Image (spheres, grey):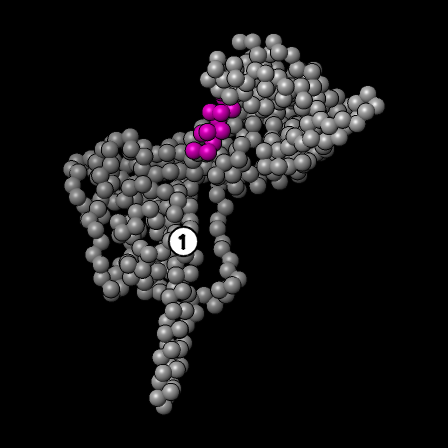
């Protein structure tokens, strides 16, 4: 019996998705629940499990295809038994020109699937399967790209040219007339020392670009700055970090201090936690804080829900879990949707100062930077203190300078004068 494999239901805000990596090929056996393919949306990468066990009879939509919810992308034959299929047999080695398929390349070099454009380039240039298997893939997940194939052909032609040059030299010395046997360039627009590589944006990158342009074109973004003396926070962390980790099983970082300080400021100035909807201002009586995280796919902003109700341990555990799953591409759509305020920390990469862009439809974002020992004046004396520059970008359409400046001052004061009872619970 043939059953259809369909694209799962996408969220209302996601119209399309892209197929990025089939884990099975036609003719291969698949167990129910085994991941068939990775599907990339503009927010997350979804894994599509096999609905039933059987032989993958047909792949209807290949890697790179754009699909929509409910679209049929493959069929599984549930009546077929698990056997050693042709796709699983080692590809015969033949020095002649063979039909090039991704499955035959995968059988020789399973870590380097062949991209469709690379397959076409390989066929056009008459590469054998041995040559393709020897190519090092530079694409996502080690895939062999068109540029990888063309680079291999250029190197091959260069070696042929050298051999012919040596041969012509020998023949010339023997008085034998020479013919022009120079190889035809594979891509005349490319020079060996001026290579270019065209790579399509991922859906996440396209979405990031779209939202950043949207933010700058719709919001009146302004940024105010302040500096905070991190000495009190550093002393508290040094004092409690060992007992904190022993009690809660998680390390005490600095981000939880900033989350607590932000929540305290948002409670004093609710407009900073609000958003614009047409001609209306929506005030949020909850505090869902987005934490910007760099992932292999790009910047993502998972949400810590009801941050005001969480202890330090609760915040640290959520941050660690979200960061880990962001690296693994395991975040869900729900974890990336919503949020009333965001925090971005360029300091982990060494940034001294920046003007963060608001994450719409939010109205403000806090930028944290690298903490450095700097000279400051205290009580008329120059002393050295660990200073962090804070940047608050805000939407001037609804947030006036007074509220923006005072809310940043409130964050500064919460960090410079923390209280240890915050650790309770």
Residue 200, above or below 217:
below
Which residue bears the numbered disc 1? 145
> Crowding near pointer 1: few (<14 within 10 Å), some, many (20+)?
many
**Whole-percent x, y for residue 231 in the image:** 67, 22
Q: Is residue 296 left or right of residue 4?
A: right
Q: Does the magenta run of residues contain 409?
A: no
Q: 167 and 212: which one is in front?
A: 167
Visible residue check, residue 80: no
**Whole-percent x, y for residue 257 in the image:** 61, 20
Q: Residue at x 38, y 78 (%)?
A: 166
Visible residue check, residue 364: yes
Q: Quadrant of residue 283?
A: top right
Q: 122 and 160: which one is in front?
A: 160
Q: Residue at x 75, y 30 (%)?
A: 375
Residue 254, above or below 221:
above
**Whole-percent x, y for residue 186 in the image:** 42, 67
Q: Is residue 2 left or right of residue 45?
A: left
Q: Residue at x 38, y 69 (%)?
A: 159
**Whole-percent x, y for residue 121 in the image:** 38, 60
Q: Quadrant of residue 234?
A: top right
Q: Residue at x 22, y 59 (%)?
A: 93
Magenta segment's dominant SS is helix
Which residues fall within the magenta stretch?
Answer: 317-328
The quadrant of the picture occupied by the N terminus is top left
């Amino acid at each position: 019996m043939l059953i259809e494999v369909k694209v799962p239901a996408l969220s209302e805000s996601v119209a399309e998705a892209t197929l990025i990596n089939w884990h099975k090929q036609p003719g291969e056996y698949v167990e129910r629940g085994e991941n068939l393919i990775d599907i990339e949306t503009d927010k997350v990468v979804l894994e599509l499990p096999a609905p039933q066990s059987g032989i993958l009879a047909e792949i209807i939509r290949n890697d790179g295809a754009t699909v929509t919810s409910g679209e049929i992308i493959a069929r599984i034959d549930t009546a077929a038994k698990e056997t050693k299929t042709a796709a699983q047999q080692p590809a015969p080695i033949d020095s002649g020109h063979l039909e090039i398929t991704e499955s035959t390349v995968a059988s020789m070099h399973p870590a380097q699937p062949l991209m469709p454009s690379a397959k076409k380039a390989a066929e056009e240039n008459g590469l054998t399967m041995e040559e393709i298997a020897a190519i090092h893939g530079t694409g996502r997940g080690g895939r062999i790209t068109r540029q990888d194939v063309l680079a291999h052909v250029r190197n091959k032609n260069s070696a042929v040219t050298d051999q012919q040059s040596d041969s012509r030299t020998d023949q010339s010395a023997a008085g034998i007339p020479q013919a022009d046997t120079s190889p035809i360039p594979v891509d005349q627009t490319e020079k060996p020392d001026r290579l270019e590589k065209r790579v399509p944006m991922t859906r996440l990158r396209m979405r990031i670009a779209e939202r950043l342009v949207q933010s700058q074109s719709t919001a009146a973004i302004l940024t105010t700055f302040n500096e905070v003396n991190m000495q009190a926070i550093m002393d508290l962390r040094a004092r409690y970090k060992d007992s904190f980790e022993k009690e809660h099983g998680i390390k005490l970082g600095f981000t939880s201090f900033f989350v607590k300080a932000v929540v305290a400021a948002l409670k004093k100035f609710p407009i900073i936690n609000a958003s614009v909807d047409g001609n209306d201002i929506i005030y949020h009586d909850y505090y869902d804080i987005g934490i910007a995280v760099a992932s292999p796919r790009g910047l993502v902003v998972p949400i810590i829900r009801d941050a005001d109700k969480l202890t330090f341990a609760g915040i640290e555990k959520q941050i660690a879990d979200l960061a880990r799953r962001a690296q693994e591409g395991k975040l869900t759509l729900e974890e990336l949707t919503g949020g009333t305020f965001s925090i971005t920390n360029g300091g982990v990469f060494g940034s001294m100062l920046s003007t963060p862009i608001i994450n719409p439809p939010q109205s403000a974002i806090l930028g944290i930077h690298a903490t450095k020992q700097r000279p400051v004046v205290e009580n008329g004396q120059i002393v050295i203190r660990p200073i962090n520059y804070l940047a608050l970008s805000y939407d001037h359409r609804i947030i006036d300078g007074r509220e923006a400046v005072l809310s940043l001052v409130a964050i500064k004061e919460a960090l410079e004068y923390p209280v240890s009872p915050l650790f309770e619970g």
